[in-house]
Structures are given as C-alpha cells and as structure tokens.
Image (cartoon, rainbow, N blue to C red):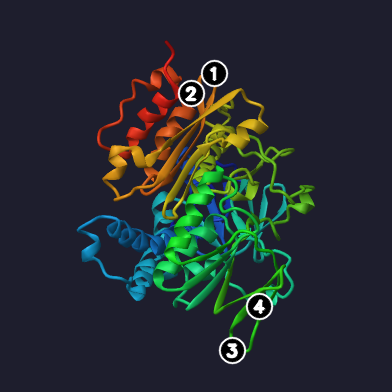
Amino acid sequence: MTAHAIAHDVTAHDTPAYDYGLIVIGGGPVGENVADYATKRGVRVAIVESELVGGECSYWACMPSKTLLRSGHAIRAARRLAGAREAVSDHLDAAAVLARRTSFTDDWKDDGQVSWLDSAGIDLIRGHGHITGTGQVTVGDRVYTAKAVAIATGSVPVLPPIAGLAEAAPWGTREATSADRVPPRLAIIGGGVAGTELAFAFSSLGSQVTLLSRGRLLEREEPFVGEYVAAALIAEGVTVDTAASPTRVHRDADGTVTITLGDGTTVSADELLVSTGRRPATDDLGLEALGLDVSRGISVDDTMLVDGTDWLYAVGDVNGRALLTHQGKYQARAAGEAIAARLDGSPVATEKWGQHVATADHSAVPRVVFTDPEVAAVGLTEEGATQKQLNYRAVEYDLGWVGGAKLHADGYTGRAKLIVDEDRQVIVGATFVGQDVAELVHAATIAIVGEVPMERLWHAIPAYPTISEVWLRLLETYGRPA
C-alpha cells in the first residue's frame, strides 16, 4: 500500500469497527515519530497533513534558518584566526547562501518525506483533519475512525497588538526563512531565539538590521547570555534596542515600513520581521466541542494522553510543554510506544524515566540558540532554581581561559555556568555561551538526566585541548569535598 492510496480494510491489529488503530493529525517531525513508533509496534497508522509532510522544521524553521546562519558563522570564525582572516572575502555570496538554503528544503517539495512514509508503512491522507467525535477524524467529506487519535499540529506565530501591524503585511519566520531576496534594511520586532538568529543571518547576507526588543535579549536564559549576544550583534553592525516599545506600524505605497516607538522616534525598513512568540496550533480541530480549554495548550499526562480522555493524545508544540522540535520528537517516541502498548493491552510504564513517559520535559530540556556566539543550555537557570526554592549553588567560569577554546578564536570570549542542587549534589542546570559551544550541552543533559553526583563527575575527564575542558574548571571552581 502506498502513502497515497488509502485502503479501507483493516489489519489483524485492528477490529473491523475502525479504519485505523491510530490517526495522527499533523505530518511534521513530531507526527512522523508518533506514527513511526506506533507502526513499529504493529499498529496500523495514518497521518493527516494539510501542507507539506515534514512540517515547519523541515521547510520554514530549523533547517532553513540554520542553513542561512551557517555561512556567516563560518566566515566570522575564519576572521577570528590569524592567517585565515587574510584569506577570506569581505562579503558572503548571498545568492549562493539562499540557493544552499533552498536545497535543504528540497525546493519546498515533500516527495522524499512521502516516500519515507510509504517505506515505513504509514498511510498519508492529504487535507485538514477535524475531530468530529470520539475516535473520528473528518477530512473533506470523508470520516475516518481510529481507536486513538494523536494531535501533532505544532504551533503558529502570534502577532502583538500593535496598531497597523497586520495591515503592513510583516514577515513572519516563514517568510524570512523562505525569502528569495535580501532586503537592504530589515527591522525585527522580537529579541527571542528566532529574532536574534535571523538578525545574524540577514546581517551576514548584507541587510542593515535593526533589532527591537522590549527587554534584554533571550530573557529566559541567564542574564549574561543576552549581554554577550547583544554585544556580538552590535559588533556585527546591527542596531540593537532593548527598550523598544513599538506603538504603530505603517507601510507606504513604495513598500517602506515605518515603525513608531513609544518615545516618538521611528525606524524605517524595507521589510519588517515579527518574531514575538508562538502559540499551540489548535484552531479548527474540533477540540472545543470535546469540552477542552485550549487557550494555553492542551493539558496532557506524561504519556501525552489528553486529560479526561482515554483515546486522544497531544504531542509536541500543541501541548505547550516545550516548544522545541527535539523535545516534541522525544514526546512522540514516548507517545507512540504508549499508544501501541495501550491498544495491545500491554502494561504502560508510567514511572519516572519509564519507556512510555516524557519525564525530561520537567527538568532536562536542552536548547541551543544558533547565534554567534552560540547559546547552549539545559535545565534550570539561577532564576528558575530560585523560583523552585531549591537549596542551590551557582558556579561560573570564563571560557576564554580554557586552552581548547583559545584554539577556536584569537581572543575567544564566552562563559559557562552550572546550577547545583546542594541537597542532592547533582547538576540541575547548565548554560554555555561562546563560539562552538552547542555540542557541550549534551554532556550537561546526560549529567542532569542521569543525576550524576558531583563527586562522580570528577572521574569524567575532558580531553585536552577541547572546549569541554571547561567541565574540569567548573568542578575546580565548585570545589571537591575534603
């Protein structure tokens, strides 16, 4: 059976009363993983997708945005090294960067992803899925039935309530990452992950970028993170305003966008990108008719089962737990296994760190911001530890003092910080900011998930000379018990 040909019979795993064991609404990486893991356990699965199979991450978010960033990172890294800086050009080839970006999206065609569904034995139903009853999903004029339904529709951007903003037709992140041209002047409203990343990307491509933020950049991370990133943006030639309060936006007949700020000053640009947050994509799914309050996401347990139901699951951004692709895929693996176990009548391992639960959502969420310097963090910040009223200790170390880091750049700058739960003597949070620190975060994630005692970490020896040597320096700063 191909992914395009939807059969109406059922396999031995499903009773004749149902078309499928599981229907997944949403064919992004989260939906694909739910479907894949359930299918591997013998469940007959269909995915309903109204756009491109592969979802936001493949075509408009993770992959194209990081592709746009990478060339700028590479040329800046070269400029930081004597001998290399003399060999590099002053400017990127913007057309070549955009072409490379397009290659990563397969020219916004999903043939490869559809072929994968076919090879995995997962059916594809094209169209918008609407839940019309228990275990019922309507697509067009056809009603499909299943023992379980999983919603994996992701999230959508939110426009702030600024007069004239919607009428000015601003870019969202989709328009920015799929752009076929580089605007001479780009204004960005929003100092979060997407706003800061795309400020670096378009600045390196030749735009004069103005970044407007109501407060410090990347405000959910440690305060020093925003300071490092802001300083790097300014050095890149970006205008950074961290006290901006846009009150009105207007686009002139010639396309020029004017943003009026609270103090009466204005910013003019050829394009405006708005990146001020996202919300779960729950519109027109039929959830309100089920009595669900979806204003803040869909409440689920750790197997992703929607509260108050025994058949409906919500996985990834749509449940509002952790709006990150890798975390959604983690949830999806647990959910796919849990769904299959329940349909088969097998035990479901719901204990902490069990096979069928997404325990890490609560304490060990890794995140990377691909700015330059990179930001890599997992678990709690110091503010988060304070809010949880933990008995903690914070230790920091200057990455510029690490021999392995100095090899990456002349005058390397960066910082590392650990949050240690003093009662349990385990790490509960880690933050790194600096060039090439993204790969440091997984070691911290393992330490947190494994609840590795501080004393045991002394036996995890970092290779020399690497940036990972900072782990030893952080332990020395923390101190070893006598």
Q: Tell me which label, 1 or 2, sits earlier in the chain.
A: 1
Q: Tell me which label, 4 or 2, sits earlier in the chain.
A: 4
Residue 319 position, x and y percent, is 64, 46
Image quarter hosting the C terminus: top left
Kind of residue sitting beneath label 3: Asp
Q: Residues within 10 Å of mark 1 (few under 14, many from 20)?
A: some
Secondary structure of the residue carrying numbered label 3: loop
Kind of residue sitting beneath label 1: Arg
Question: Spatial distance from mark 4 to mark 1, Cα to Cα?
Answer: 53 Å
Image quarter hosting the N terminus: bottom left
> Circles 4 and 1: CB distance less than 8 Å?
no
Secondary structure of the residue carrying numbered label 1: loop
Q: Nearer the viewer, mark 1 or mark 2?
A: 1
Question: Spatial distance from mark 4 to mark 2, Cα to Cα?
Answer: 50 Å
- Check disc 1 and report the residue beneath it: 424
- Check disc 4 and report the residue beneath it: 168
Secondary structure of the residue carrying numbered label 2: loop
Q: Nearer the viewer, mark 2 or mark 3?
A: 3
Foreground residue among 373 and 461: 373
Residue 297 position, x and y percent, is 69, 48
Kind of residue sitting beneath label 4: Ala
> Circles 1 and 2: CB distance less than 8 Å?
yes
Q: Residues within 10 Å of mark 3 (few under 14, many from 20)?
A: few
> Circles 4 and 2: CB distance less than 8 Å?
no
> Taking the image as drawn, is residue 85 in sight?
yes
Residue 300 position, x and y percent, is 67, 39
- Check disc 2 and report the residue beneath it: 451
Q: Residue furthest bottom?
A: 253
- Check disc 3 and report the residue beneath it: 254
Kind of residue sitting beneath label 2: Glu
